[in-house]
């Protein structure tokens, strides 16, 4: 290997001083750029640069919405190449890997090679590489084995394609890489076509997400594929101006502008009629309901005929709209709260995630109802008729957790069931796997779970061939997984795999619907012969309690009170001793019900309380509540909340 590296360094030096070699022109130019502009020494071997988690989170937060869209593309592509030794990277426009999918079995090797979450592949300090050189050139390319500038990366083959946002600015790079590959560079031709195709799909999905309320015009050179796989996609406003496009459309319009010698070639903000023989009023003529052959449109400069499909914006009311009604919720979700603003927000977010394939991570203190929320999401989804399998990761004995989760073959180990065991993951096939207290799962098992999540297949103990599974994973924890990652107690890659969507349940003391919850539990639990009402004094005592055990403590409290009460009405003396003693110490004057406080005031108080608890760390509150930092900042401005250190 050292001899190969020495020969490679010699070739890089010769190219840098102007000699020609058989390398592709784009590789030679990059090598010269590395020496002349980036001042990199080809003799120096560089280790992979992996950003610390705090910096990585900043890069991920900066492209949060795009990241969710791109993730679907990554997972779809990985299913096509799974088992072929490839790892997929998604980087931001600076070259930092913000998402990746690979075989967890090879995580140590991938980490050393830099094919890992947080790896920085900018050409300025890593030399010629697929991601960095793709960013530098704006073109899809393969950097194969000794094409790399740094001799450290000779074993790798990397193929990347740029992903542009709807304004034509580089948003990120999609990369498919492998630790080992055949020697001919042509072996990566299919990989190049795949990353180009999926970068295009991600661009289109991002464009459609960003311009849901505007005209969308899809154009294709082929009549047969005009509706299913359009080459060019444009967003057009009501005035006929182009306000967004995918990269293929941008390049097409730039070529048209060059043919017409347009003074301003930038298509962003230009009229659609400057490029096509149609105006905005003609867009309804390209509706999907019409035969494709009738939807032809001509480019003005080149005269090229394309086939179009138009998607109209949502209908806008011509008069003052009525106050917006809240979207109807599925019954299992609707009955989880009684009007608490924070719970309303959590449930509305959960409703939008019900039928997605994204993993969900539920945060909340012990007893806040994390499993109830997971069951409600399952019951409201299309998987409702399939199993809901709950696994308490903290309760399973470490020696048995692997066989309990993944199953085992007959006689796989001493004490194994004679007929084998199916395993909880396989039992959840078609339904939902709920992993409670995921933060307490042993590190060794986290690797196995990561593989299940990445490849949607499980290998029972004692079996050689994996079993495919179709599961929706919901995890829950009361622990701070970010701190566990920092402490090396939880895998960083598993954390990012699980938190595709985060739901943060409020503590019971933060909720404004305590009275509703008490009445709901009184009506729903126990024998009808037991008391179903509380005296005003008992209700006030419950409202004054801080509920460190949350809903679980409340349930136990009501069960106790109903059991010991001697009349049809539960009084203060019937409550558990700790709450009864608290009631005796407090003033007998009942405090006003929180429900009477205006909703905006309740929201503001809760936000201030959360910020104080986190030392005014907006990122920590956003992470705890499952929101973007920008959302927390907007609420602070709306409520007039100013951090103490910014007060004059």
Image (tube, rainbow, N blue to C red):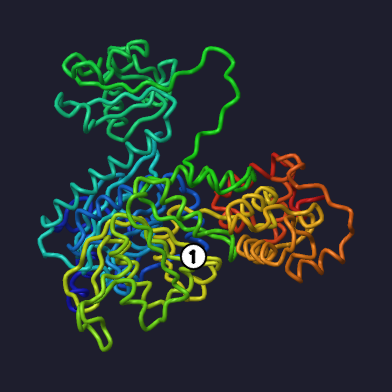
Question: Residue under circle 1?
Answer: 53
- The residue sitting at the bottom extreme is 414
Q: Is residue 448 left or right of residue 337?
A: left
User: Which residue appears at 22% of the width and 77% of the height?
Assistant: 420
Q: Residue 16 placed where, x, y %?
A: 26, 60
Q: In the figure, residue 28 lies in which quadrant?
A: bottom left
User: Which residue appears at 24% of the width and 73% of the height?
Assistant: 460
Q: In the figure, residue 313 lies in which quadrant?
A: top left
Decide which of 440, 106 is in the foreground and name it.
Answer: 440
User: Which residue appears at 75% of the width and 47% of the height?
Assistant: 594
Q: Residue 343 placed where, x, y %?
A: 59, 48
- The correct choice, above or below, for 480 with respect to 544 in the image is below
Tell me the element at label 1: helix
Q: Is residue 583 left or right of residue 60?
A: right
On the question of residue 38 being in view, the answer is no
- The correct choice, above or below, for 596 with respect to 318 in the image is below
Decide which of 65, 265 is in the foreground and name it.
Answer: 65
Count up the numbered dots: 1
Q: Residue 61 placed where, x, y %?
A: 50, 52
Q: Residues within 10 Å of mark 1 (few under 14, many from 20)?
A: some
Decide which of 153, 569 is in the foreground and name it.
Answer: 569
On the question of residue 309 being in view, the answer is yes
Decide which of 634, 179 is in the foreground and name it.
Answer: 634
């Amino acid at each position: 290997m050292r001899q190969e590296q020495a020969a490679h360094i010699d070739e890089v030096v010769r190219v840098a001083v102007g000699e020609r070699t058989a390398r592709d022109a784009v590789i030679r130019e990059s090598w010269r750029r590395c020496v002349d502009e980036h001042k990199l020494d080809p003799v120096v071997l560089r280790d992979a640069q992996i950003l610390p988690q705090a910096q990585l989170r900043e890069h991920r937060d900066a492209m949060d919405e795009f990241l969710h869209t791109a993730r679907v593309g990554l997972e779809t592509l990985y299913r096509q190449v799974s088992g072929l030794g490839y790892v997929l990277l998604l980087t931001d426009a600076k070259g930092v890997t913000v998402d990746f999918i690979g075989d967890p079995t090879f995580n140590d090797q991938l980490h050393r090679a830099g094919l890992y979450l947080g790896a920085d592949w900018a050409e300025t300090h890593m030399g010629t590489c697929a991601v960095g050189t793709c960013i530098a050139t704006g073109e899809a390319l393969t950097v194969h084995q000794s094409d790399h500038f740094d001799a450290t990366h000779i074993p790798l083959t990397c193929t990347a394609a740029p992903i542009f946002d709807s304004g034509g600015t580089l948003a990120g790079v999609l990369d498919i890489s492998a630790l080992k590959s055949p020697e001919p560079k042509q072996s990566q031709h299919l990989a190049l076509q795949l990353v180009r195709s999926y970068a295009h799909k991600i661009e289109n999905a991002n464009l459609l997400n960003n311009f849901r309320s505007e005209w969308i015009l899809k154009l294709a050179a082929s009549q047969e594929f005009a509706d299913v796989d359009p080459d060019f996609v444009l967003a057009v406003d009501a005035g006929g101006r182009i306000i967004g496009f995918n990269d293929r459309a941008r390049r097409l319009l730039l070529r048209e502008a060059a043919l017409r010698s347009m003074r301003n070639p930038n298509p962003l903000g230009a009229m659609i009629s400057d490029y096509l023989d149609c105006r905005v009023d003609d867009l309804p003529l390209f509706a999907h309901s019409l035969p494709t052959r009738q939807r032809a449109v001509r480019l003005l400069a080149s005269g090229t005929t394309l086939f179009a499909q138009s998607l109209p914006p949502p209908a806008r009311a011509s008069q003052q709209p009525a106050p917006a009604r809240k979207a109807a919720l599925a019954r299992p979700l609707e009955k989880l709260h009684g009007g608490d603003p924070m719970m309303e927000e959590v449930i509305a977010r959960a409703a939008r995630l019900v039928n997605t394939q994204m993993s969900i991570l539920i945060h909340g203190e012990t007893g806040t109802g994390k499993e109830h929320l997971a069951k409600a999401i399952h019951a409201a989804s299309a998987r409702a008729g399939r199993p809901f399998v709950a696994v308490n990761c903290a309760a399973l004995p470490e020696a048995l957790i692997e066989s309990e989760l993944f199953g085992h073959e007959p006689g796989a180990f001493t004490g194994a069931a004679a007929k084998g065991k199916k395993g909880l993951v396989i039992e959840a096939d078609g339904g939902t796997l709920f992993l409670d207290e995921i933060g307490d799962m042993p590190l060794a098992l986290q690797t196995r779970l990561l593989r299940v999540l990445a490849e949607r297949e499980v290998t029972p103990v004692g079996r050689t061939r994996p079993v495919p599974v179709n599961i929706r994973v919901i995890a829950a924890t009361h622990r701070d997984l970010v701190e566990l990652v920092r402490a090396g107690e939880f895998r960083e890659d598993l954390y990012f795999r699980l938190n595709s969507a985060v739901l943060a349940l409020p503590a019971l003391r933060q909720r404004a619907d305590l009275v509703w919850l008490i009445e709901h539990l009184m009506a729903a639990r126990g024998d009808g012969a037991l008391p179903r009402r509380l005296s005003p004094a008992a209700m006030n005592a419950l409202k004054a309690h801080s509920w460190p055990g949350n809903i679980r403590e409340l349930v136990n409290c009501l069960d106790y009170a109903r059991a010991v009460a001697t009349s049809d009405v539960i009084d203060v003396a019937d409550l558990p001793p700790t709450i009864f003693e608290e009631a005796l110490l407090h003033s007998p004057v009942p405090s006003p019900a929180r429900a009477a406080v205006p909703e905006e005031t309740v929201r503001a108080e809760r936000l201030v309380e959360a910020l104080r608890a986190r030392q005014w760390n907006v990122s920590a509150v956003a992470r705890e509540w499952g929101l973007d930092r920008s959302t927390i900042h907007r609420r602070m401005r709306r409520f007039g909340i100013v951090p103490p250190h910014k007060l004059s």
